[in-house]
């Protein structure tokens, strides 16, 4: 295999001392238990592909793609190794070597055909305000929720400008389709030609910050934290738990912001057994929802059970993918746990 | 019958792997070494292990027990291939007996998990190494692990009361007991500690625990001269003080932390972190004041001292971030664990640190000196371009010079990380008489040499060629 992309990460692969500290929180390793399921194992496999000591194989491809990109390993790494970046390089090399997953291709074709991950015509709730706002595929699909979220911005004094956007391209990048990502990025820029904007989706904002370095994507929560105290709103007096999305807590270092919003709107927070930067992943990231849906659901089930065990009936989060995965599992199970976006609570408070 | 089929019959299909990729993953640990096993197994019961060992002994197949695989000297690298037993699935805490102050655990229990389980009872299991978040009790016993608080609390051997072991012929033996003292017999359970998987498969352990200290106070002292810091450490110990931690960082360690982590530590030749813990504030104050005065007597400047947990975290941040910082110290350089945990007499601590710098400079590599100096452990890391052959040759020379020096001052090869492969050549040179006695014991307990063979006293004489190394080296 021509490990063209992995070769760029040689120094990083050498810096990993294989201490295994990443075992501690790795959700996939904890569920499956072979060392190749954990971050260190995947780094070792990547090293094998890079060095030529391993030939590419379905076995390796399955392991490399079974990762949620939750960054728990990065947080615990004794040498600050950027595991997801290395895995993206490995995924790209594997894809270029012919390891193409049918479900991945289907998803990417949907984006190519319709500009969103659902593969259907979605109409943007166009607004002609002043501040460009990127919704992201998942919110674009949730028309009614999105209308309310845009109202939040208006109540906070922001006039949103919403256009006929397209997917940010995250699935192309994460699933190892580098050339397709480059092509799609052009399309994204054409459809959403703004340098500075508010991004409503956790996944999009994290991906854009990393992959479009010339763009300034402001996460909606940053605006809510700043502006909410200045605007009239009521205290809700409810009790919830909060699931930290990986990209928010570990990816963008926002642990306090959502908590201060909950406090501001008078919501009692009961923390899950793991929270903040130590929060367990719901299983929805890194393409795992498509690669291995039963595994993604198993990880979400852990969060659902944890929430029920601490005695709350509502779990709020920020990431639409977490919301989807945890919500889906919660409703399939007992249905006792409601899953909401934090923005739903903000809207209630501003109503 | 081929190995895999037999193992599948014993532990089930779902617990056996022989895909090359999986073998490759289990072929390395946190050392520089790598070698492929033939098969990896996840046993769940003592009986399964017994059957595996009986089979391996009959067929003379090497068996290597593996915990987290976090050893830095190649402990779980299967140098002769064979069966790797992944013990992490045997992770049940079997008994916590507070009135008798012991617990009984399966060997795959993670150190931090054990401490989390016993903490509500106001007790702790103290020998925890830095890797306690993932290190298994079995691995810690096999390596006689210890950590930053070993100056006060000792190492794993001090806490092992008893254990259940599967011997090389498949016999299950219960060694030691549950009491604090035992006068009679060979106390073979203590022999198992530090045996690096060469004498038996530890499947269960009875460990004592002790009350958690109520108070902890941490201080930092800076020194313009490394020599003064070394002398302060020697004096603190000689004074009869009882630190619960006594750490040294040299100027390279300080510079690394400041460069990579922007922590803004003082630009000095050495920093000492000193800590005392206990039940009564007056007693802890007494210890801290004594250590502070000794630091000051040796021209140290005490810049911080606090009981507050948050403050202590800040004071310790530099030491905590040291490893990632060293990994990022120089572009293209990686941090390797070679000659990394010598134990030296207190009086030679400063001289040893300076000698390490001298040897590094002479050989064109970077070495830092830091560590748990309170217990006499001098850690180093060799920072080098692991892709260059000449750097490995330089590292080999440096390692040899460091060990020769350590031997000359009455130090020992390994105070913490064990011998396995990387340190075996130097250790065997220094401990010729011990090596022969150990070979006799090994032969008596494992005549077919199936348990982690060719480690410790039987390891190859050249660590650099003992196995392929995990890095791709360009000619």
Image (cartoon, coloured by chain):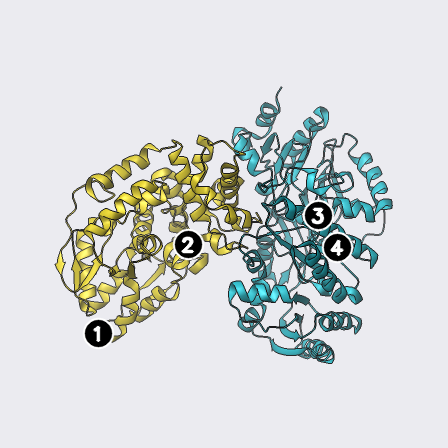
Q: Depth check: A179 or A77 in front?
A: A179
Separation (CA) of disc 4 from disc 1: 69 Å
**Chain B pictured colour:** cyan
* Residue under the image location 62 percent in, 57 percent down: B130
Q: Earlier in the sequence, mark 1 or mark 2?
A: 1
**Residue marked by disc 4:** B402
Q: Same subunit under labels 3 and 2?
A: no
Residue A225 lies, with reference to residue B108, above or below; the image says below
Separation (CA) of disc 3 from disc 2: 55 Å
Residue A191 lies, with reference to residue B148, above or below; the image says above
The circle on residue A309 is: 2
The circle on residue A232 is: 1
Q: State which chain disc 3 sits on.
A: B
Picture coordinates of residue B398, whole percent (x, y): 72, 52
Q: State which chain disc 2 sits on.
A: A
Chain in yellow? A
Picture coordinates of residue A75, whole percent (x, y): 48, 56
The local secondary structure at tag 4 comes to helix
Q: Residue furthest top?
A: B1
Q: Same subunit under labels 2 and 4?
A: no
Label 4: how many Cα within 10 Å (few below 14, some 14–19, many 20+): many
Separation (CA) of disc 1 from disc 2: 35 Å
The local secondary structure at tag 2 comes to helix
Label 3: how many Cα within 10 Å (few below 14, some 14–19, many 20+): some
Q: Going by the image, does B221 lie left or right of A58?
A: right
Picture coordinates of residue B54, whole percent (x, y): 70, 28
**Residue marked by disc 3:** B396
């Amino acid at each position: 295999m021509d490990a063209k992309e992995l070769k760029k990460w040689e120094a990083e692969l050498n810096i990993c001392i294989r201490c295994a500290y990443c075992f501690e929180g790795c959700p996939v390793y904890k569920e499956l238990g072979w060392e190749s399921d954990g971050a260190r194992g995947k780094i070792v496999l990547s090293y094998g592909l890079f060095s030529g000591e391993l030939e590419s194989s379905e076995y390796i491809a399955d392991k490399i793609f079974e990762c949620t990109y939750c960054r728990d390993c990065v947080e615990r790494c004794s040498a600050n190794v950027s595991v997801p970046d290395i895995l993206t390089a490995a995924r790209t090399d594997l894809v270029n070597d012919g390891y193409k997953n049918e479900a991945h291709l289907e998803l990417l074709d949907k984006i190519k055909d319709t500009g969103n991950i659902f593969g259907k015509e979605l109409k943007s709730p166009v607004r002609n305000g002043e501040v460009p706002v990127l919704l992201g595929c998942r919110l674009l699909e949730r028309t009614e929720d999105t209308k309310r979220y845009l109202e939040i911005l208006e109540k906070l004094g922001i006039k949103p400008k919403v256009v006929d956007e397209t997917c940010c391209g995250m699935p192309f990048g994460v699933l190892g389709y580098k050339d397709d990502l480059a092509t799609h990025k052009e399309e994204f820029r054409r459809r959403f030609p703004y340098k500075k904007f508010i991004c409503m989706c956790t996944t999009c904002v994290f991906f854009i910050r990393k992959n479009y370095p010339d763009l300034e994507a402001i996460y909606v929560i940053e605006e809510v934290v700043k502006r909410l105290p200045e605007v009239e709103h009521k205290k809700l007096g409810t009790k919830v738990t909060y699931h930290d999305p990986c990209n928010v807590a570990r990816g963008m270092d926002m642990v306090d912001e959502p908590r201060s919003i909950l406090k501001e709107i008078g919501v009692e927070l009961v923390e899950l057994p793991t929270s903040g930067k130590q929060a367990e992943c719901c299983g929805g990231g890194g393409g795992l929802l498509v690669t291995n849906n039963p595994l993604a659901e198993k990880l979400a089930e852990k969060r659902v059970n944890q929430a029920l065990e601490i005695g709350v009936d509502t779990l709020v989060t920020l990431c639409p993918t977490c919301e989807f995965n945890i919500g889906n599992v919660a409703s399939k199970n007992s249905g006792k746990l409601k899953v909401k976006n934090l923005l739903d609570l903000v809207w209630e408070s501003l109503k | 019958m081929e190995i895999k089929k037999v193992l599948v019959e014993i532990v089930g299909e779902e617990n056996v792997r022989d895909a090359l990729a999986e073998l490759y993953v289990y072929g390395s640990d946190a050392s520089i070494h790598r070698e492929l096993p033939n098969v990896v197994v996840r046993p769940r019961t003592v009986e399964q292990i017994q059957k595996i060992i009986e089979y391996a002994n009959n067929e003379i197949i090497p068996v290597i027990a593996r915990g987290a695989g976090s050893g830095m000297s190649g402990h779980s690298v299967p140098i002769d291939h064979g069966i790797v037993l992944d013990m992490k699935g045997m992770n049940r805490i079997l008994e916590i007996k507070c009135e008798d102050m012991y617990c009984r655990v399966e060997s795959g229990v993670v150190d931090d998990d054990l401490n989390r389980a016993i903490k509500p009872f106001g007790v702790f299991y103290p020998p925890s190494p830095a890797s306690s978040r993932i290190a298994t009790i079995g691995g810690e016993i096999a390596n006689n692990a210890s950590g930053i608080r070993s100056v006060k609390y000792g190492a794993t051997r001090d806490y092992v009361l008893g254990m259940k072991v599967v011997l090389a012929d498949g016999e299950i033996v219960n060694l030691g007991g549950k009491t604090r003292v035992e006068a009679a017999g060979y106390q073979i359970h203590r022999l198992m500690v530090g045996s690096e998987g060469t004498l038996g498969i530890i499947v269960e352990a009875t460990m004592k625990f002790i009350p958690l200290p109520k108070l902890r106070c941490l201080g930092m002292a800076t020194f313009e001269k490394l020599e003064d810091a070394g002398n302060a450490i020697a004096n603190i110990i000689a004074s009869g003080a009882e630190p619960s931690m006594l750490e040294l960082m040299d100027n390279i360690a300080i510079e690394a932390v400041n460069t990579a982590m922007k922590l803004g530590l003082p630009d000095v030749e050495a920093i000492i972190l000193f800590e005392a813990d206990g039940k009564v504030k007056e007693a802890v104050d007494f210890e801290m004041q004594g250590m502070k005065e000794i630091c000051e007597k040796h021209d140290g400047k005490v810049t911080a001292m606090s009981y507050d947990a948050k403050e202590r975290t800040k004071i310790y941040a530099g030491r905590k971030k040291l490893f990632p910082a060293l990994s990022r110290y120089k572009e293209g350089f990686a941090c390797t664990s070679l000659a990394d945990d010598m134990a030296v007499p207190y009086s030679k601590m400063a001289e040893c640190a300076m000698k390490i710098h001298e040897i590094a400079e002479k050989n064109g590599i970077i070495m830092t000196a830091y560590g748990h100096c309170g217990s006499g452990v001098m850690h180093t890391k060799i920072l080098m371009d692991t892709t260059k052959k000449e750097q490995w040759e330089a590292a080999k020379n440096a390692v040899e010079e460091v060990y020769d020096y350590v031997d000359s001052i009455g130090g020992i090869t390994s105070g913490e990380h064990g011998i396995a492969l990387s340190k075996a050549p130097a250790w065997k040179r220094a401990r010729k008489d011990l090596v022969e006695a150990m070979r006799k014991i090994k032969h008596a307990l494992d005549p077919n040499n199936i348990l982690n063979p060719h480690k410790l006293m039987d390891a190859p004489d050249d660590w650099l060629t003992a196995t392929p190394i995990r890095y791709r080296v360009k000619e």
